[in-house]
Amino acid sequence: MAYYTDQERDTIRAAAFGAVSLVSAAEPGHFDVHSEHLAASRVLAVVPTSLRSLLMVDRIPIATSTDRAAVLASLEQSAQILAARSAEDLDAFREVIAHACGAAAAAVGGVSDRESAAVTDVRRAVGIL
């Protein structure tokens, strides 16, 4: 497993949770957001071993942003960090983020156009598209 600094881990973790928050914020509804986060957390709970230490929160949870530009920038930065350290970690991160965001979008009433657009933005930011 590659070594990551505390700052890099925080960036990657914030990007992951920010991506889910961005997708959840695409459609209004307090209870929907809860269900969407729960669906995404099920995906994040079974991440590959190589990513587990990057995504697990071992202290007070970090704040997540729903500011589109900030989240997308943190996702791009995370992809750059991971690419520099480990192609395997980058591939796993991309897969987990895409799956978690897809699960969040589909959690309540199917995937809306706005949620689909948010998922596409996230996938593009991590280099899937």
Image (cartoon, helix red, strand yellow):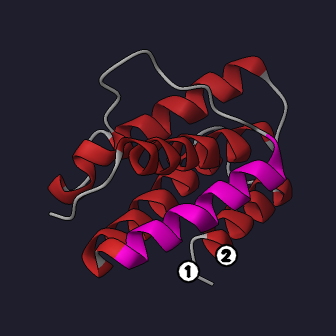
Q: Is residue 82 visible?
A: yes
> For residue 88, which quarter of the picture?
bottom left
Which residue is disc 1 drawn over? 128
Foreground residue, 117 or 1? 1
> Residue 23, percent across and down?
70, 47
Under mark 2, the amino acid is Arg
- Element under disc 1: loop
Q: Residue at x 28, y 75 (%)?
A: 86
Q: Is residue 41 left or right of residue 22?
A: left
Tag 2 near tag 1, CB within 8 Å: yes
- Element under disc 2: helix
Q: Residue at x 47, y 21 (%)?
A: 61
Let me know if residue 77 is in the magenta part: yes
Q: Is residue 91 visible?
A: no
> Residue 47, percent across and down?
27, 51
Q: Up-down: is 100 above or below 65?
A: below
Q: Which mark is residue 87?
A: none
Image: magenta residue range: 67-84
Foreground residue, 95 or 5? 5
> Residue 89, percent across and down?
30, 68
Which residue is disc 2 drawn over? 124
> Residue 123, percent across and down?
62, 70
Under mark 1, the amino acid is Ile
